């Protein structure tokens, strides 16, 4: 297949007050390719794509489209040149239908006064078929979940007949099945000549989907090439600027003392007869496919979901956890899978995020002890190496890795015996992952019991003392560290499905 250059960015430079965000960056985007744009948070990926998609107009350097120099003044100009972006923060109107959202601002007319709703519906059905989506065109977007909305946003880009579609972390809210559908669709569409720019922290996805790559570091171009000519280790090394033998730190031996024991936990239709123990200083992993019941099990332990049957024991004593407040008072904390929705309040500063769930520590007679909040907050943020100008910085303005540290900080001001981590490194770059891994192993070394859930199999295998394999709401098997092999876990899951 002959591929030609659709877009070329030459010597791009972008400055903000006091900051050089991009400095002499080059990138070529060719037809019929998926081009990975990779780098740590703050590397300049989003800034570069905002220039390409017409959001940022004041920049140095040159942008060429099909060999002709262009300078876009708006996203509308970008659309005219065949460039669309599917942003990580979804852009849709909840009260409008799928059909209305797809063609918002591009409505077909029937005569001069009326909308051609019939034609719009017909085109919507055809678009939905492209990605095998069984949705009704008249369904309101507000009734869809995040993953479904993400798929519709991708369809919107396809509907504009785009030459280049930029996808910024498109799989962050998708299940494995939905990700598979997306990848198949992208592969099918690239055969028609469309080029995709794929931004993702999940390097396994980069190697599964992409043909070419560009690496940015600290606003500078580092390298470009074909995916087949590099390895994950080499890509990570280019991203962080140093060789990485192994990003997973060694884990120390745990103690014999049992911190958490659950016996026959059952929520009918979700999970049943779940029993396991977690020792002091142990990292106990939960592995399984999306929808297996892993998150629901730990949500019940943390009091987010009601427990129908079974027992929860902390340090040998049965505890009744009827709410999150109960769980916290028993020394249990949880970092949820969706940190943006449940982990922190983006529009509030760091210090507010730390104090809000800890009123019993920092408030007396209805008044906050501001001095104590500042003292403890500064201490824990310093310990976790939170990179922020100060405690008054809004949480939404932090990188993904630092947001996750703030979520940890709000719990670590307390005496935590059991820390539950559900997908703790989702959506953060490889450098930040290293930091989170080091923190987890340090918490365990200090004696904290930890439950780790991750869909990243190497992560859960490398970071755990033992792993419980969950499938179809059942704990299929608990594997010791010497048996932690990915093929073995997948075999357990597959065999359990075959027996069903």
Image (cartoon, rainbow, N blue to C red):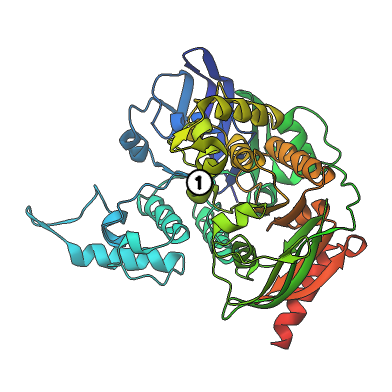
Report the side of 101 relative to 458 (left or right).
Answer: left
Image quadrant in which you'd find residue 159: bottom left
Is 370 rendered above or below residue 281? above
Q: Residue at x 33, y 68 (%)?
A: 125
Report the side of 88 relative to 376 (left or right).
Answer: left
Is 44 rendered above or below residue 264? above
Q: Secondary structure at mark 1?
A: helix
Viewer-proximal residue among 364 and 69:
364
Image quadrant in which you'd find residue 272: bottom right
Q: Position of residue 164 (x, y in %)?
A: 46, 43
Q: Position of residue 150 (x, y in %)?
A: 45, 55
Viewer-proximal residue among 400 and 448:
448
Report the side of 253 relative to 335 (left or right).
Answer: right
Q: Residue at x 31, y 55 (%)?
A: 94
Q: Is residue 49 visible?
A: no
- How many numbered dots are placed on residues in this image? 1
**Residue extending farthest bottom:** 499
Viewer-proximal residue among 425 and 314:
314
On the image, numbered disc 1 is attached to which residue?
340
Where the C terminus falls, by quadrant?
Answer: bottom right
Q: Position of residue 316 (x, y in %)?
A: 78, 64
Q: Residue at x 38, y 31 (%)?
A: 54
Viewer-proximal residue among 431 and 77:
431
Q: Position of residue 163 (x, y in %)?
A: 44, 45
């Amino acid at each position: 297949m002959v591929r030609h250059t659709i877009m070329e960015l030459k010597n791009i430079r972008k400055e903000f007050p006091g900051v050089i965000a991009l400095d002499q960056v080059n990138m070529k985007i060719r037809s019929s390719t998926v081009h990975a744009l990779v780098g740590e948070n703050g590397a300049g990926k989003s800034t570069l794509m905002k220039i390409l998609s017409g959001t940022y107009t004041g920049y140095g350097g040159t942008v060429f489209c099909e060999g002709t120099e262009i300078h876009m003044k708006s996203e509308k100009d970008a659309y005219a040149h065949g460039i669309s972006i599917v942003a990580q923060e979804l852009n849709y109107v909840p009260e409008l239908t799928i059909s209305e959202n797809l063609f918002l601002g591009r409505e077909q007319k029937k005569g001069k006064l009326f909308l051609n709703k019939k034609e719009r519906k017909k085109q919507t059905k055809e678009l939905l078929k492209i990605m095998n989506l069984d949705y009704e065109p008249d369904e309101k977007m507000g009734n869809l979940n995040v993953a479904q909305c993400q798929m519709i946003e991708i369809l919107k880009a396809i509907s504009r007949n785009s030459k280049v579609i930029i996808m910024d972390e498109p799989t962050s809210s998708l299940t494995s099945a939905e990700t598979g559908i997306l990848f198949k669709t992208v592969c099918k569409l690239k055969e028609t000549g469309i080029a995709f720019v794929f931004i993702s922290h999940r390097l396994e996805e980069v190697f599964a989907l992409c043909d070419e790559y560009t690496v940015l570091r600290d606003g500078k171009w580092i390298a470009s090439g074909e995916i087949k000519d590099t390895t994950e280790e080499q890509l990570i090394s280019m991203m962080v600027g140093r060789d990485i033998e192994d990003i997973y730190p060694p884990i120390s031996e745990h103690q014999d003392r049992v911190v958490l024991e659950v016996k026959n936990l059952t929520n009918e239709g979700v999970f049943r007869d779940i029993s396991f123990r977690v020792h002091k200083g142990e990292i106990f992993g939960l592995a399984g496919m999306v929808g297996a019941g892993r998150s629901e099990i730990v949500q019940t332990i943390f009091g987010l979901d009601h427990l129908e049957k079974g027992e929860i024991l902390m340090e040998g004593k049965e505890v009744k956890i009827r709410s999150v407040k109960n769980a916290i008072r028993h020394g249990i904390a949880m970092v949820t899978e969706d940190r943006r929705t449940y982990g922190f309040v983006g529009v509030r500063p760091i210090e507010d995020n730390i104090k809000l769930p800890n009123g019993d520590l920092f408030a007396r007679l209805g008044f906050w002890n501001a001095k104590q909040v500042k003292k403890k907050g500064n201490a824990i943020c310093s310990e976790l190496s939170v990179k922020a100008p100060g405690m008054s910085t809004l949480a939404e303005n932090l990188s993904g890795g630092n947001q996750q540290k703030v979520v940890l900080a709000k719990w670590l001001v307390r005496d935590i015996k059991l820390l539950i981590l559900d997908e703790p490194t989702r959506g953060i770059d490889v450098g930040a992952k290293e930091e989170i891994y080091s923190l987890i192993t340090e918490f365990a070394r200090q004696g904290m019991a930890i439950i780790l859930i991750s869909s990243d199999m190497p992560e859960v295998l490398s970071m755990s003392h033992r792993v419980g394999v969950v499938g179809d709401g059942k704990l299929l098997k608990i594997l010791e560290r010497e048996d932690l092999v990915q093929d073995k876990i997948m075999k357990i899951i597959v065999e359990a499905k075959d027996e069903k």
